[in-house]
Image (cartoon, rainbow, N blue to C red):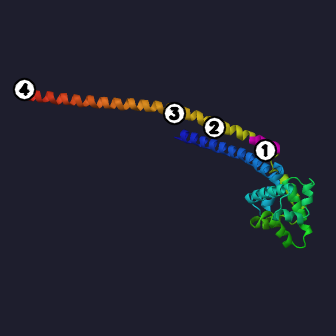
Amino acid sequence: LVGTLGGLGIALGATELISFGREALAMGDDLATAADQVGIGVERFQTLRQVFRELEVDGDSFDKAMMRLSTTLGDVQSGATNEATKSLDKMGITARILSGEIDTTDELLDAIADSAKRFGTEAEFTAAVVDIFGRRGGVELAAALKNGSGAIKSMEDDVRRLGTVLTEEQINKLADANEVIDKFAQTTSYTFAIWASNVIGSINTVADQWLELQRYLKTGVTLNGAGLAAEARITAISN
């Protein structure tokens, strides 16, 4: 029993370790995908995400805000006009985008943060940020951006010193490994399914044979019982 429990504990420990490893691989893949979708380098995407979390903007809200900002950057580059592009114009950012000085989402974020000093009051800056990001997350983002890009970059440096940022090379290795594991898991699933179908077929055959044997034995017992009963009656009459 002790040996069985020990083996079970080892098996569970291995399962948990594998599960943890899969989560780590998936995290790298997810980070690479999220950063690519919003047009930010994967390393800076991580530092910004962690900084904004410290500034009371959760990860999901940050991701949505960066997606929206990426769309707004594209709108300016294509000449579209909306509340967000008008707000960027008030911030003095539009010309810098059109000239190519700003061409990534994180550069645009830095420029928005630095534009805070152009506004007479914090409320005016907040209103402009809300026009870009929307009411739901704009207020929190304005509060996080109001001290300029320098303050944000200083906090990013602190994050890097903590050693909690994966390099682009590390992210790519995790993403590649996760893809290999997924393919292996898929192949293993197909192999198991084929094996199971063959085993089930064999089990069904054995089960059918066993049922046939039971029916045969049951019939034989019944006939044998009837013969013994008839023999007993003949003996009784003779006597």
User: Mark 3 or mark 1: which comes first in sequence?
Assistant: 1
Q: Disc 2 to disc 4, how far (Cα)?
A: 78 Å
Going 67% across and 37% down the picture, which residue do you hit? 183
Q: Is residue 230 left or right of residue 75?
A: left
Q: Are marks 3 and 1 in contact (CB under 8 Å)?
A: no
Please state the extent of the stretch shown in magenta in the rendering.
Answer: 168-175
Q: Give the Cα separation between the discs numbered 2 and 1.
A: 23 Å
| Disc number for residue 186 | 2
Q: How many marks?
A: 4
The amino acid sitting under disc 1 is: Ile
- What is the CA distance from the residue labelled 3 to the residue labelled 4? 62 Å
The numbered mark, 2 or 4, whose residue comes first in the sequence reads: 2
- Asked whether 239 or 204 is in front, the reply is 204
For the point 84% across and 73% down, which residue is it? 123
Mark 4 Cα shell of 10 Å, populated few (<14), some (14-19), many (≥20): few
Q: Secondary structure at mark 2?
A: helix
Mark number, residue 171: 1
Q: Nearer the viewer, mark 3 or mark 4?
A: 3
Residue at mark 4: 238
| Mark 4–mark 1 distance (CA, rounded to whole Å) | 98 Å
Q: CA distance from mark 3 to mark 1?
A: 39 Å
Instruction: Give the mark, 4 or 1, whose residue is nearer the N terminus.
Output: 1
Relative height, residue 236 to residue 125 (above, below) = above
